[in-house]
Amino acid sequence: MARLRDRPGEPVVGWGHRPSAWPRPPTVADLDAVAARTRWSSSVATATRGWLSTAALDALDLARRQGVVAETEWFAAYPRLSGLLGDAGATPADGPPSRRPRR
């Protein structure tokens, strides 16, 4: 939440959430409620699904929906996440923070 406050308008890309432990599946509306205009994406820990905000769905030219982007569609969209980031941070090609080489 601090990043949203301190760097408004910059995309947020995360890795490793585990929705299986949540009381219900994540929805686009959940992300939009927190940051409606932020391009926000989070890949599940297994990297088989992506949870995106409406702004991120639009930026990646994906159909709007209520749930996550799953498997085949997610695998095709995932490489395009770097276009959301530009110079704002690490790209999806860098992988999750735990898998990035130390610099």
Image: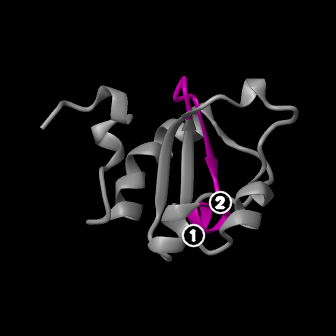
Residue visible at 38% across and 45% down? 79
How many angstroms separate mark 2 from mark 1 (CA)? 7 Å
Name the kind of residue labelled 2 in the image: Ser
User: Which of the labelled discs sits on residue 61, or is there none?
Assistant: none
Q: Is residue 1 above or below residue 5?
A: above
Look at the image and give the residue range highlighted in magenta. Answer: 44-59
Q: Residues within 10 Å of mark 2 (few under 14, many from 20)?
A: many
The answer to the question of whether label 2 and label 1 lie on touching residues, with beta carbons closer than 8 A, is: yes
At numbered mark 1, what does the secondary structure look like: helix, strand or loop? loop
Instruction: Name the quadrant containing residue 26.
Output: top right
Q: Judge left or right: residue 44 versus residue 90.
A: right
In percent of width and height, residue 49 lies at 61, 35
Q: Is residue 21 above or below residue 26?
A: above
In the rendered image, which residue does mark 2 sit on?
53
Q: Is residue 39 above or below residue 48?
A: below
Residue visible at 87% across and 35% down? 24
Q: Is residue 94 magenta?
A: no
Q: Residues within 10 Å of mark 1 (few under 14, many from 20)?
A: many
Q: Which is more toward the observer, 10 or 51?
A: 10
* Pointer 2 or 1: first along the chain: 1
In percent of width and height, residue 48 lies at 57, 28
Name the kind of residue labelled 1 in the image: Thr
Instruction: Name the quadrant containing residue 65.
Output: bottom right
In the rendered image, which residue does mark 1 sit on?
38
In percent of width and height, residue 25 lies at 81, 37
Q: Judge left or right: residue 92 versus residue 42.
A: left
